[in-house]
């Protein structure tokens, strides 16, 4: 594929956003396809003509889930972004993805959908796994590990790294380190089931999958 055609395809993929009529699941697929083409072909932002190489901050909705920081960090690490959390209330936080506009917006979309998907599937699994009193937490730990493993595999293959401009911008914010504690694992079976679902969520973009297909027959 000629470079001009590659760049044109990336532009068209980036146009498929929620604002332009896509649902969030579709927007994720288009964003990831664009990201893959950029990485595969070593396309620079300035080559996209109408794209400005500018670092932006994209904010998520708030959440009180104790495991959300781990998911947000996993997404940021694999979308050429940095991330920090901002307190909304005593127990509620929102997250800010810092990166080039297309990257930070894609990261926010993927984060929001995986957050909802993980919560939904963990609740469903909890209803089934009555022998594990911490089924929800253990499933979530596995889910995030599965998401991380699958995304890191993709990033390693595509040699995706956070741009220096983003690193410098983030460093200039002068943010302190977060000390929120994550969840503690206690059941390998629940973790394993969560990990498989996390991998599947990334592989198949199952962010809008109907309920079911989680529990064994």
Image (spheres, rainbow, N blue to C red):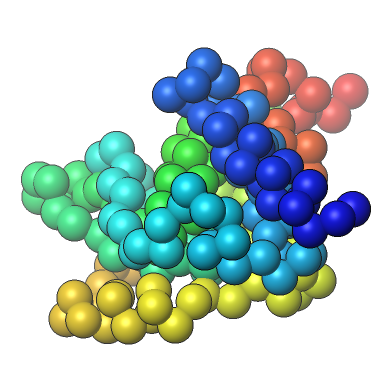
Whether residue 135 is situated above or below residue 1 in the rendered picture: above
- Residue at the spot x=10%, y=45% of the render? 89
- Residue at the spot x=41%, y=57% of the render? 52
- Residue at the spot x=29%, y=64% of the render? 84
Query: How far across and how far down the image is residue 132, in percent?
Result: 61, 45
Res 193 seen here: no
Query: How far across and how far down the image is residue 47, in percent?
Result: 59, 61
- Residue at the spot x=78%, y=65% of the render? 40
Q: Is residue 75 left or right of residue 89?
A: right
Give 75 or 191, whichever is nearer the viewer: 75
Image quarter where the C terminus lies is: top right
Q: To which quarter of the image does residue 30 belong?
A: top right
Looking at the image, how many numbered discs can be counted on the residues? 0
Give 167 or 210, whichever is nearer the viewer: 167
Whether residue 54 is situated above or below residue 9 in the rendered picture: below
Q: Is residue 195 left or right of residue 157?
A: left
Q: Is residue 36 left or right of residue 106?
A: right
Whether residue 189 is situated above or below residue 127 in the rendered picture: below
Whether residue 146 is situated above or below residue 181 in the rendered picture: above
Res 50 seen here: yes
Query: How far across and how far down the image is residue 198, in percent?
Result: 68, 48
The residue sitting at the left extreme is: 89
Query: How far across and how far down the image is residue 208, in percent?
Result: 63, 23
């Amino acid at each position: 594929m000629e470079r001009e055609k590659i760049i044109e395809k990336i532009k068209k993929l980036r146009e498929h956003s929620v604002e332009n009529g896509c649902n969030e699941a579709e927007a994720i697929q288009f964003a990831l396809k664009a990201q893959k083409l950029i990485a595969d072909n070593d396309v620079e932002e300035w080559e996209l003509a109408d794209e400005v190489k500018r670092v932006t901050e994209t904010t998520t909705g708030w959440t009180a889930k104790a495991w959300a920081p781990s998911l947000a960090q996993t997404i940021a690490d694999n979308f050429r972004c940095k991330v920090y959390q901002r307190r909304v209330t005593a127990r509620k936080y929102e997250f800010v993805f810092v990166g080039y506009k297309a990257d930070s917006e894609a990261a926010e979309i993927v984060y929001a959908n995986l957050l909802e998907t993980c919560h939904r599937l963990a609740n469903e699994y909890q209803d089934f796994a009555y022998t594990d009193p911490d089924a929800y937490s253990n499933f979530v730990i596995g889910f995030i590990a599965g998401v991380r493993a699958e995304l890191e595999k993709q990033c390693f293959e595509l040699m995706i790294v956070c741009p220096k401009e983003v690193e410098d911008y983030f460093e200039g914010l002068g943010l302190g380190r977060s000390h929120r504690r994550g969840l503690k694992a206690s059941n390998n079976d629940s973790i394993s089931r969560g990990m498989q679902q996390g991998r599947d969520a990334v592989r198949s973009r199952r962010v809008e999958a109907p309920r079911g297909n989680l529990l064994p027959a």
